[in-house]
Amino acid sequence: MKDEEFDVEELAYEVSVLLEGMLYFAGVKKQNLQKAAELYVEVIDDVLENSDATGVDETIEVVAYLKNNHAELFK
């Protein structure tokens, strides 16, 4: 990536890849990564609406929600 210029599309792609990688190591089956990433983005605001979680704890809370409510996506 170029230091002097941030391409929004490139950044969005990198964030997407990181999200799928994080979900894979959280236990999502490889064939379900795209679906899990879409669900993660869909539910993040609702899951954290009344939460005091900050930083990495936000991510942990959303993944815990997915595991509890969409167990079929996980190994």
Image: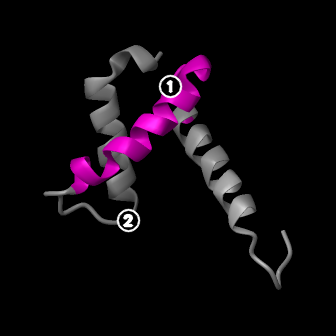
> Would you say residue 45 sits in the magenta stretch?
yes
Measured as percent of width and height from the top left, residue 60 is found at: 36, 47
Q: How busy is the neighbourhood of tag 2: few (under 14 within 10 Å), some, or many (20 plus)? A: few
Counting every numbered tag in the picture gives: 2
Residue at position x 62%, y 54% from top?
15
Name, please, the residue furthest toward the bottom. Answer: 4
Magenta span of residues = 25-48
Q: Which residue is mark 2?
A: 55
Q: What predominant SS class does the magenta segment belong to?
A: helix
* Residue drawn at 34 percent across, 19 percent down: 71
Dot 1 alpha-carbon crowd within 10 angstroms: few under 14, some 14 to 19, many 20 or more: many
For image coordinates 41% across by 35% down, the residue present is: 39
Helix, strand or loop at disc 1? loop
Give yes or no for contact between labels 1 and 2 (Cβ–Cβ under 8 Å). Answer: no
Q: Looking at the picture, which amino acid does disc 1 mark?
A: Val
Q: Picture quarter containing residue 64?
A: top left
Residue 36 in sight from this viewpoint: yes
